[in-house]
Amino acid sequence: MRILVAEDNVENQEIIRRRLERAGHQVSIAANGLEAVEMAKAQKPELILMDISMPIMSGIEATLAIRGAAELRDTPVIALTAHAMEGDEARCLSVGCDAFATKPIRFAELLALIEKIREARSAKAKSA
């Protein structure tokens, strides 16, 4: 899958990139929410991993902008956060995220979630 990772921490960017590429995915990195929106519009990724706490534009704001773009409306977004507070998951899902994961990332779980999303997209494409 072509995956856009929106993450402001450089160390996390590289860890996520290496793990996803090792699993066979093509990865692009955005360092903030605004960059994520711009890259998503230009690259049309198949999935976006969105850190919620980022500079310039938060992951929540970026997800709202992505959901507002007709060509990206159906792109799956998985919210990522290191500071999971009560209500965060509901808030992320309410703005259009498809799933929610906490940091540190449990890569086996994340890869299983990505595969589930890939399979759902494939089934949807076949039925269309």
Image (tube, rainbow, N blue to C red):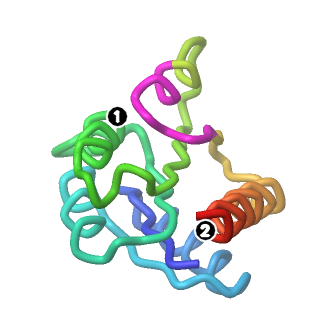
Residue found at x 47% / y 59%:
48
Alpha carbon distance from label 2 to label 1: 27 Å
| Residue 43: percent from left, percent from top | 30, 77
Labels 2 and 1 touching (C-beta < 8 A): no
Residue 38 location (% of width, % of height): 19, 64
Question: Which residue ends up furthest to the front in the rendered image?
Answer: 128
Q: Which residue is at a point 68% across and 52% down the rendered structure image?
A: 105
Q: What element carries label 2?
A: helix
Residue density around tag 1, few if under 14, some if 14–19, many if 20 or more, within 10 Å? many
Nearer to the camera, 78 or 106: 78
The C terminus: image quadrant: bottom right
- Nearer the observer, disc 2 or disc 1? 2
> What residue is shown at x 54% (from left), y 44% (from top)?
80
Residue closer to the observer: 81 or 119: 119
Name the residue beneath numbered marker 2: 125
Please state if 92 lies on the left or on the right of 6 as rendered.
right
In the image, taking residue 99 as reference, residue 46 lies left or right, namely: left
Q: Give the amino acid type for the residue marked by disc 1 in the picture.
A: Ile
Q: What element carries label 1?
A: helix
The amino acid type of the residue labelled 2 equals: Ala
Residue pointed to by mark 1: 60
Queried whether the magenta region covers residue 99, the answer comes back as: yes
User: Which of the 4 image quadrants contains residue 126?
Assistant: bottom right
**Start and end of the magenta stretch?**
91-100
